[in-house]
Structures are given as structure tokens and as C-alpha cells.
Image (tube, rainbow, N blue to C red):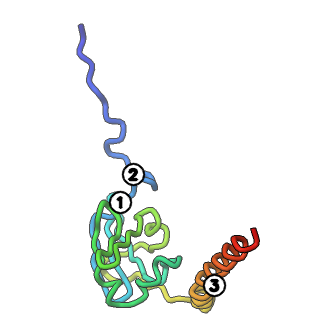
Amino acid sequence: MAETKAVDKTAGTKPSKSQIQITDVRVLNPRSLRLEFNNGAVRLFDRYRLRGPMYIPLMEEENFLSVSVKDGNLYWAALDLTCPAKYVYPRSVPYDDNATAREYVPTRKDIIQERIATVLFPAMAIAGIIGTVWWYINN
């Protein structure tokens, strides 16, 4: 009987977006990271590209600079916060070590959205608590 060999069809192919992983991170300055990915790409990521209330502590310089790679994602141990590579990759720009890539500069729209989020999310949480208490009292 002939012996069959398993063929790895994924060998030599680039990982899909869901399989993308960060292999190395280096802090370039207090707001930018140089990231290496498992597909060979080297990209520049700026902390102002992070969106959502869970990333607000990273706007502080000392928190942002304590980054490492854990399981292929960005990880901040002091905050126990993970930022997935599939979130970071599309929000980063190609980077070469000759520093020809430009850093992200937040626009007025980005700044306004960040300020609205910092006020709106806690206000929504308080409104939800008040609504729940009101419902509980009246039912």
C-alpha cells in the first residue's frame, strides 16, 4: 500500500487578517510604537489611534510606554489591558527604519470625538443606573 503524505497548504502563504500577530514592539517616542507583524510588515502605530473607553488610560505617557507583546497582541501588564493585533494593523501605517513615515497627528475631529467619549460614556452609565433604580422602585 502506498504511503500518503500530508501536504501543508498554508506553507509560504501570508496569514489572514484574523491570524495576524505582532512579533515585536519597540517604543519610538512617548506616543508611537514600531511594530513587526508575522506577515513581515513593519508598521508605525500611534496611541491617538486607539478608540474606546478601555484605552483612555493609555493616553497617559507612563501607561503607554510599558507595552509588551503577549500572545501576538499588544499588552500593558500594569493595566492588564490587551489590544488585539487585528485592531492595531489597520490603524497603523507602513514604516521603514529610515523614518520617512509620518506620525499620526490627531485632527480636530479626533480630539472632539475623544472628549465626547470621555463625557458621554460615564453619563450613559449613570443614566442606565438611574433607569434601573426607577424601574425597580415602580415595579
- Identify the residue under disc 1: 21
Q: Secondary structure at mark 2?
A: loop
At label 1, which amino acid type do we have?
A: Gln
Whole-angstrom CA distance, mark 3 to mark 1, is 35 Å
Whole-angstrom CA distance, mark 3 to mark 2, is 41 Å
Q: Secondary structure at mark 3?
A: helix
Q: Quadrant of residue 134?
A: bottom right
- Identify the residue under disc 3: 123
Which residue is at 31% across, 81% downward?
A: 98
- Identify the residue under disc 2: 15
Is label 1 in contact with label 2 (beta carbons under 8 Å)? Answer: yes
In this rendering, would 135 be left or right of 98? right
Give the mark nearest the N terminus, 3 or 1: 1
Q: Pick whichever, 129 or 113, lies toward us.
A: 129
Crowdedness near tag 2: few (<14), some (14–19) or many (≥20) residues, C-alpha within 10 Å = some
At label 3, which amino acid type do we have?
A: Ala
Q: Secondary structure at mark 1?
A: loop
State whether residue 86 is above or below residue 19. Answer: below
The nearer-to-camera label among 3 and 1 is 3
Crowdedness near tag 3: few (<14), some (14–19) or many (≥20) residues, C-alpha within 10 Å = few
Which residue is at 31% across, 42% downward?
A: 11
In x, y percent, where is residue 96?
A: 34, 75
Is label 3 in contact with label 1 (beta carbons under 8 Å)? Answer: no
Whole-angstrom CA distance, mark 1 to mark 2, is 9 Å
Which residue is at 42% across, 81% downward?
A: 46
In this rendering, would 102 be left or right of 72? right
* Screen quadrant of the C terminus: bottom right
State whether residue 111 is above or below residue 34. Answer: below
Give the mark nearest the N terminus, 3 or 2: 2
